[in-house]
């Protein structure tokens, strides 16, 4: 019984420390982004992303900040694709709404043109 309790506590502690590490890396990414260091922010985001594989609850937040870094670096097409990924993969999250706003801002600034809808024509006999 004692072994079972110790095993459960060990697993619980490992899970908490992993989440703490992800939070720490996200905080580091935000700090670096605020300081204008997108390279450092991208590194911290990649580290956080590796720790969360299989658990997608923070992925939209990571992707949104990655998109903002891409924008800041002038990589507008990549940023737009990142925002579109968020909207398609996490449509009900707050980050999907933020991604839509970023896409609209990019469109207004002339950096993004949404794909025109495909027009189908009936085949001619």
Image (cartoon, helix red, strand yellow):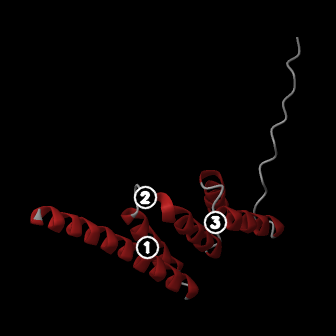
Question: Is 76 situated left or right of 62 in this image?
Answer: right
Q: Are marks 3 and 2 in contact (CB under 8 Å)?
A: no
Indicate the secondary structure of the residue bearing disc 1: helix
How many numbered dots are placed on residues in this image? Answer: 3
Image mark for residue 84: none
Depicted 95 relative to depicted 36: above or below: above
Question: Is 123 situated left or right of 20 in this image?
Answer: right
Cα gap from disc 3 to disc 1, whole angstroms: 21 Å
In the rendered image, residue 104, in percent from the top left (x then y), is placed at 78, 65
Q: Are marks 1 and 2 in contact (CB under 8 Å)?
A: no
At 22% from the left and 69% from the top, the residue drawn is: 9
Q: Which residue is mark 2?
A: 55
Query: On the rendered image, what quadrant is the C terminus found in?
Result: top right
Cα gap from disc 1 to disc 2, whole angstroms: 19 Å
Q: Which residue is mark 3?
A: 95
Indicate the secondary structure of the residue bearing disc 3: helix
At 48% from the left and 58% from the top, the residue drawn is: 56
Q: Residue 105 occupies which quadrant of the picture? A: bottom right
Mark 3 neighbour class, 10 Å CA radius: few under 14, some 14 to 19, many 20 or more = many
Cα gap from disc 3 to disc 2, whole angstroms: 16 Å
Mark 1 neighbour class, 10 Å CA radius: few under 14, some 14 to 19, many 20 or more = some
In the rendered image, residue 102, in percent from the top left (x then y), is placed at 72, 68
Q: Which residue is mark 1?
A: 43
In the rendered image, residue 103, in percent from the top left (x then y), is placed at 73, 63
Which label sits in the foreground, 1 or 2? 2
Q: Earlier in the sequence, mark 3 or mark 1?
A: 1
At 70% from the left and 64% from the top, the residue drawn is: 97
């Amino acid at each position: 019984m004692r072994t079972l309790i110790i095993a459960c506590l060990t697993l619980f502690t490992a899970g908490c420390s992993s989440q703490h590490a992800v939070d720490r890396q996200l905080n580091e990414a935000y700090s670096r982004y605020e300081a204008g260091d997108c390279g450092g922010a991208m590194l911290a985001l990649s580290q956080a992303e590796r720790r969360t594989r299989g658990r997608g609850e923070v992925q939209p937040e990571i992707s949104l900040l990655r998109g903002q870094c891409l924008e800041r670096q002038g990589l507008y097409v990549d940023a737009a694709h990142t925002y579109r990924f968020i909207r398609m993969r996490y449509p009900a999250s707050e980050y999907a709404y933020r991604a839509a706003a970023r896409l609209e801002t990019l469109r207004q600034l002339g950096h993004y043109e949404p794909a025109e809808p495909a027009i189908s024509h009936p085949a001619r006999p």
